[in-house]
Image: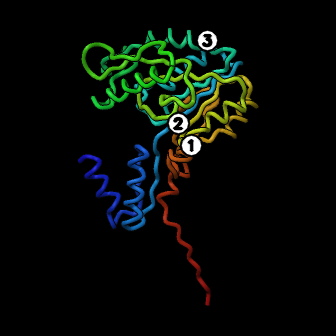
Amino acid sequence: GDGPDCGNAIASHEHIDKVAFTGSVEIGKKIQEAAAKSNLKRVTLELGGKSPLIICEDADIDYAVSVAHRAIFTNAAQNCTAGSRTFVHAKIYDQFIAKSIELAKNRVVGDPFDSNTEQGPQINESQFKKILDYVEAGKKDGAKLECGGERHGNKGYFIKPTIFSGVKDDMRIAREEIFGPIMSVLKFDSYDEVIKRANSTSFGLGAGVITKDLTRGLTFAQRLEAGSVWVNDYDAIINQAPFGGFKQSGHGRELGKYGLEAYYEVKTVVIKLV
């Protein structure tokens, strides 16, 4: 059945002791409320994100463009960890934009059953329209539409890979989770500044940094408020490593030892020898 029927039944069931949910913040809160009102079952939540990817001035530009492209456009950006805020150092900003546009325009959008396809459709009509509404919001707020921003072809829910430059932190496309193939590129000048801006969100699921300086990468990893931080890569998820979010991106962890512990019942047994 659908989420409202099955999900409500599971979340409020008196004989289910643990629920793990992946989805929106709105529904995650409803599940936690239902769990509390029923049998106080334990809940693990993996919710939304507005994940930053930070490109430092020492990054290999072609590699950085490739990682950023994959971070946002994989699965048509229908991914909670999508790198939807791309922060690029001012020294390489224009070069990054130019190369990203070229790569986006060459991305193959179409039938997901075709082996040559790199990007399929959005999940349904309502999401398709929502994404195009965000394109209009980006233009209205003053961001520059560099490419895409429209339907691909004349049927189906396909959207061309879209890039906005000149994005500011207070724009809707930089604040709200879109769940669609829109790369928002923001410019930064200093590392303290970009860390503060990257953390200025209610989400905290993932983050990435591209740099040749490992010490800098580790500093970012320590200071960025996200459950997963990838240095010189993005969305590198493995079964042994715990995965989950900070803030309203959820709580608890999936995968690894921490993911299993959420399902344990810990019992202490004391025996006195008499």
Q: Give the spatial CA distance, label 1 vs label 3.
A: 36 Å
- In this picture, residue 198 sits left or right of residue 162: right
Question: Secondary structure under badge 2?
Answer: loop
Mark 1 nearby-residue class (10 Å; few <14, some 14–19, many ≥20): some
Q: Give the spatial CA distance, label 1 vs label 2.
A: 7 Å
The residue mark sitting in front, 1 or 3, is 3
Provide residue 183's location: percent of width, then percent of height. Answer: 49, 22
Q: Tell me which label, 3 or 2, sits earlier in the chain.
A: 3
| Residue carrying label 2 | 237
Q: Are marks 1 and 2 in contact (CB under 8 Å)?
A: yes
Instruction: Identify whether 185 is placed above or below 249.
Output: above
Q: Nearer the viewer, residue 230 or 2?
A: 2
- Which quadrant would the C terminus be assigned to in this image? bottom right
| Residue carrying label 3 | 94
Residue depicted at 50% across the width and 54% down the height? 260
Q: Give the spatial CA distance, label 3 vs label 2.
A: 31 Å
Q: Which mark is residue 241?
A: 1
Mark 3 nearby-residue class (10 Å; few <14, some 14–19, many ≥20): some
Instruction: Kindly identify the amino acid type of the residue bearing the numbered disc 2.
Output: Ile
The residue mark sitting in front, 3 or 2, is 3
Q: Which mark is residue 79?
A: none
Q: Nearer the viewer, residue 222 or 147?
A: 147
Instruction: Kindly identify the amino acid type of the residue bearing the numbered disc 3.
Output: Asp
